[in-house]
Image: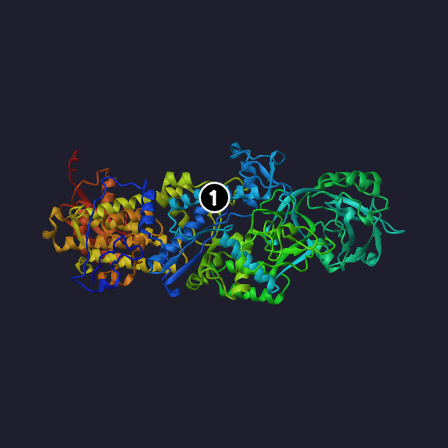
């Protein structure tokens, strides 16, 4: 067996041969004689990030080789981070885990397709642009050539909406593109500093031409197959952002309110009291509803009552969703106060009486159903045009004055739906929107998507339940249209008929080869721009798709779907999607929907789902909570390897607390790798010396024991990484590394020095130690490379050619062959013996350099052979200059200093030699 020579750095696709490569099976001529290059006098992790990012880029170490076959490729669907400000330490956590997988698979010999995207469209970007430049969109304004915004960063403050300068939609989009381009440069710089092994030639923007064409093509095909449709229906609406919101984007939050006990009147009977937190919706009431089994209201079912103040007659109906134990047990159904109202309205076929407009204000005209009623004057003079908050105050005062308010309002906390990026509760308004079937109203499709979830390998597996719960809980199709500006346009126009009415039922669909298009600035085929908005002409759809409608196609975008068929066939379906568990309902599910509808397959084989980063109070870190930590300063202070170590210490699916202390441990590990490697490479002459990595030269039992333990680690760490348990692999490798440093290096350093003998004159025992050290260093650097890419690459450059990240992943068999029948426990036994000797010096407060003239060491019977075999190394490391008697441990010695069951029963210390001041 031998370790073949490394490939040169000029061939980025080549790997660096090692102990486990094919050439290692032949002894003799193929033995690698690695030459130690210049090793720095003082090691440091500082500056390694810039040094190796530059080298990796120049040498194309992570460049994707698209000549490989699908079987030779491992393709990753990477989360495109939202470009709306800055990354935070949670991103470091999630993306490091992905990178560990990428580096591991690359070292296993697979060609890794590892792109990076930027999610730069959508509401977060628009909000950032508004605040950063101090502008807002006014659709009535014309485009201004060369427009410069009033602010550049707004002096670190958000510009109030009232102070924002109105500009055209096109000018606004240009500012979005400008700011996201700057943000993306900063994001890439941080990712490079962190050491992500991305092929930076494979980047994309979700607003870029390729992404827009992909999203529009998929939509057109959804439309042609009947999977996309438009409908005029009640939907959730954010009054701040002026856009519809999908079910997947909801966030339930506590919201302060008051219960109001209000009387409805039945002819000739007692008032019927309901309790509501939204009395301003009394003008929109369409029914009172109680549970069919509630005996209190059985006699009212099928009758009618009149609303207070407005005298509108409404039916009293039964429905199973009414809650008898909540409030009065009978509720008013308004169109629309919440999602339950929508369900009652749909299932009970109730009329529509909407009074809230898209701006969040009450309609400015008196509704037909209130006309000529008792409350007409109240509505027209006091309610119309008000916000819901101020309208509520007016209505409550009027109820109090009329006697229809029983008692005073009672404070409460109610649950309200918010858009996940919004600040105000959502309203429900009726509007025309675009939807895509997702199984919410189609049982057959729902079952198909549940089946896809069963095909997918989740890591950890319990995340599958979250997927299934989401699919089973859907109550409607996927709303994809948004009334915003910076996004992928709905690629449709609508004819304007002879009466000037827009015909939404017969959209004008573009040809696929013309995509991407913007219907607000481009005319459809067969029309001219001067026909826009004219009788017999057309209008463009002004809406854009929600950001998930584009992000859900990230596999198709990066794989070149319908753009680069050769690439698509090589990487799709992809192997891995990594992401957070909070977007299983959005990104993961919607990606499966699109792939199922379009490609009839899962988009990937594996989904690795990471947890959240928690602050020291164990609360989720998020920008909205204001408790995030920006990572660049941390990376500079502690080093990227240290940050990666912290991130890698948590398994997929588990939350992790942000701990600077853990990063300090990681930094200590990275520095120890440098120091221990420098020490190991110093045996035999240091820089310029030749090291033969010939396993056949490992002849001493202690050296073989170390390699046997290392073989176990390689086997177990590899198995862990194969099952996406990177944290377990790190734990195993790190534990062995510290044992190697604390025990093995100390035990063999005197033998490895060989009393200063030249290479040609060293003994077989010294050669065994030096060779075992080199093999162990070669193996451990590769085991640690996915976690500490900079420190390991630095050490690799001291004595090996090429990059450690293109070296083959170690395998256990060659190490086992070199170890023979050695027992890994023998190294531990020798280490315990050394620790027992050193403990004697510690208790005597003597220097570790103090010689032990004579000693007797009691050893457990099961460890005696191992210590006898390694006794010369133990004596040298423990500075035992005379006799070291080994005896079997006897009962009653447990009260003495014990190390692994070993006890120094007698000892005599000599004089410590003077320190060499030179």
Compared with 662, 591 (above or below) is: below
Compared with 512, 582 (above or below) is: above
Q: Residues within 10 Å of mark 1 (few under 14, many from 20)?
A: some
**Residue 402 point in image, percent of width and height:** 84, 40
**Residue 724 point in image, percent of width and height:** 41, 58
What secondary structure is marked by label 1?
Answer: helix
Can the viewer see residue 87 in this picture?
no
Residue denoted by label 1: 181
Compared with 249, 217 (above or below) is: below
Can the viewer see residue 162 in this picture?
yes
**Residue 564 point in image, percent of width and height:** 45, 60
Q: What residue occupies the far top of the structure in this picture?
A: 155
In this orientation, which residue lies closer to the viewer: 89 or 430?
Answer: 430
In this orientation, which residue lies closer to the viewer: 827 or 69?
Answer: 69
If the image is split into quadrants, where does the C terminus sit?
A: top left
**Residue 796 point in image, percent of width and height:** 26, 50
313 sits left or right of 386 in the view: right
94 sits left or right of 783 in the view: right
If the image is split into quadrants, where does the N terminus sit?
A: bottom left
The image quadrant that residue 887 belongs to is bottom left
The image quadrant that residue 76 belongs to is bottom left
């Amino acid at each position: 067996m031998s370790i073949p020579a490394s490939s040169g750095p000029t061939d980025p696709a080549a790997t660096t041969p090692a102990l486990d490569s094919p050439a290692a099976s032949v002894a003799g001529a193929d033995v690698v004689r690695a030459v130690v290059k210049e090793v720095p006098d003082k090691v440091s992790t500082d500056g390694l990030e810039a040094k190796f990012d530059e080298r990796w880029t120049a040498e194309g170490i992570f460049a994707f080789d698209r000549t490989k076959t699908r079987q030779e490729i491992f393709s990753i669907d990477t989360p495109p981070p939202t470009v709306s400000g800055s990354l935070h330490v949670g991103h470091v956590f999630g993306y490091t885990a992905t990178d560990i997988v990428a580096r591991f698979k690359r070292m296993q010999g697979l060609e890794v397709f590892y792109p990076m995207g930027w999610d730069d469209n959508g509401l977060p970007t628009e909000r950032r642009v508004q605040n950063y430049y101090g502008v807002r969109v006014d659709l009535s304004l014309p485009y201004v050539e060369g427009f410069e915004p009033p602010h550049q960063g707004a002096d670190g403050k958000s510009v109030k909406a009232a102070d924002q300068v109105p500009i055209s939609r096109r000018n606004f989009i240009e500012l979005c593109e400008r700011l996201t381009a700057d943000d993306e440069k900063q994001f890439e710089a941080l990712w490079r500093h962190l050491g992500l092994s991305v092929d930076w030639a494979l980047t994309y923007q979700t607003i870029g031409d390729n992404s827009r064409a992909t999203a529009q093509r998929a939509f057109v095909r959804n439309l042609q197959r009947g999977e996309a449709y438009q409908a005029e229906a009640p939907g959730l609406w954010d009054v701040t952002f002026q856009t519809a919101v999908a079910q997947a984007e909801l966030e339930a939050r506590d919201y302060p309110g008051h219960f109001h006990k209000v009387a409805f009147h039945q002819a000739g009977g007692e008032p019927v009291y309901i309790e509501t937190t939204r009395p301003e919706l009394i003008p929109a009431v369409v029914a009172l509803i109680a549970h069919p089994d509630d005996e209190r209201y059985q006699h009212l079912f099928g009758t009618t009552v009149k609303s207070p103040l407005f005298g509108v007659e409404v039916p009293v109906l039964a429905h199973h969703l009414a809650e008898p134990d909540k409030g009065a047990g009978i509720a008013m159904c308004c169109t629309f106060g919440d999602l339950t109202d929508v369900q009652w309205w749909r299932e009970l076929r109730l009329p529509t009486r909407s009074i809230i407009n898209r701006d969040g204000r009450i309609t400015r005209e008196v509704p037909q159903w209130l006309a000529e009623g008792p409350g007409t004057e109240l509505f027209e003079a006091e309610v119309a045009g008000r916000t819901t908050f101020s309208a509520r105050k007016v209505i409550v005062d009027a109820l109090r004055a009329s006697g229809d308010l029983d008692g005073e309002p009672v404070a409460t906390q109610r649950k309200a739906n918010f858009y996940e990026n919004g600040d105000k509760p959502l309203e429900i308004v009726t509007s025309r929107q675009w939807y895509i079937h997702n199984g919410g109203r189609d049982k057959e499709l729902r079952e198909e998507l549940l089946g896809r979830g069963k095909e997918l390998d989740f890591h950890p597996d319990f995340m599958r339940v979250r997927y299934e719960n989401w699919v089973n809980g859907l109550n409607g199709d996927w709303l994809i249209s948004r009334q915003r500006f910076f996004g992928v346009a709905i690629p449709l126009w609508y004819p304007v008929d002879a009466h000037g009415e827009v015909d939404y039922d017969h959209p004008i669909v573009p040809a696929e080869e013309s995509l991407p298009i913007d219907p607000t600035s481009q005319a459809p085929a067969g029309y001219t721009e001067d026909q826009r908005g004219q009788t017999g002409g057309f209008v463009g759809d002004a809406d854009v798709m929600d950001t998930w409608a584009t992000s859900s196609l990230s596999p198709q975008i990066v794989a070149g779907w319908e753009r680069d068929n050769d690439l698509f066939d090589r990487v799709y379906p992809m192997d891995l999607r990594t992401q957070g568990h909070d977007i299983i309902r959005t990104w993961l599910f919607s990606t499966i929907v699109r792939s199922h509808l379009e490609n009839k397959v899962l988009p990937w084989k594996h989904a690795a789902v990471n947890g959240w980063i928690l602050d020291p109070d164990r609360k989720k870190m998020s920008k909205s909570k204001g408790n995030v930590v920006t990572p660049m300063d941390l990376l500079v202070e502690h080093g990227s390897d240290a940050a990666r170590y912290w991130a890698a210490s948590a398994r997929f699916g588990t939350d992790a607390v942000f701990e600077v202390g853990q990063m300090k441990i990681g930094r200590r590990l990275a520095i120890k790798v440098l120091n221990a490697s420098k020490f190991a490479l110093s045996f035999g002459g240091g820089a310029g010396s030749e090291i033969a990595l010939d396993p056949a030269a490992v002849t001493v039992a202690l050296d073989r024991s170390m390699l046997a333990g290392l073989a176990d680690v390689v086997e177990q760490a590899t198995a862990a990484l194969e099952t996406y348990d990177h944290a377990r692999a790190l734990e195993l490798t790190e534990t062995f590394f510290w044992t190697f440093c604390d025990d093995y290096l100390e035990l063999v350093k005197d033998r490895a020095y060989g009393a200063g003998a030249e290479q040609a004159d060293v003994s077989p025992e010294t050669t065994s130690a030096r060779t075992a050290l080199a093999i162990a260093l070669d193996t451990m650097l590769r085991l640690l490379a996915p976690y500490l890419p900079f420190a390991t690459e630095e050490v690799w450059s001291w004595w090996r050619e090429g990059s450690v990240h293109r070296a083959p992943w170690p395998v256990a068999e060659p190490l086992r062959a070199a170890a023979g029948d050695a027992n890994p426990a023998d190294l531990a036994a020798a280490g315990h013996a050394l620790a027992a000797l050193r403990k004697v010096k510690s208790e005597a407060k003597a220097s570790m350099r103090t010689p032990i003239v004579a000693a007797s060491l009691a050893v457990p019977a099961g460890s005696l052979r191992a210590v006898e075999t390694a006794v010369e190394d133990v004596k040298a490391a423990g500075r035992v200059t005379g006799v070291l008697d080994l005896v079997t441990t006897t009962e009653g010695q447990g009260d003495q200093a014990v190390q692994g069951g070993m006890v120094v029963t007698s000892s005599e210390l000599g004089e410590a030699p003077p320190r060499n001041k030179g």
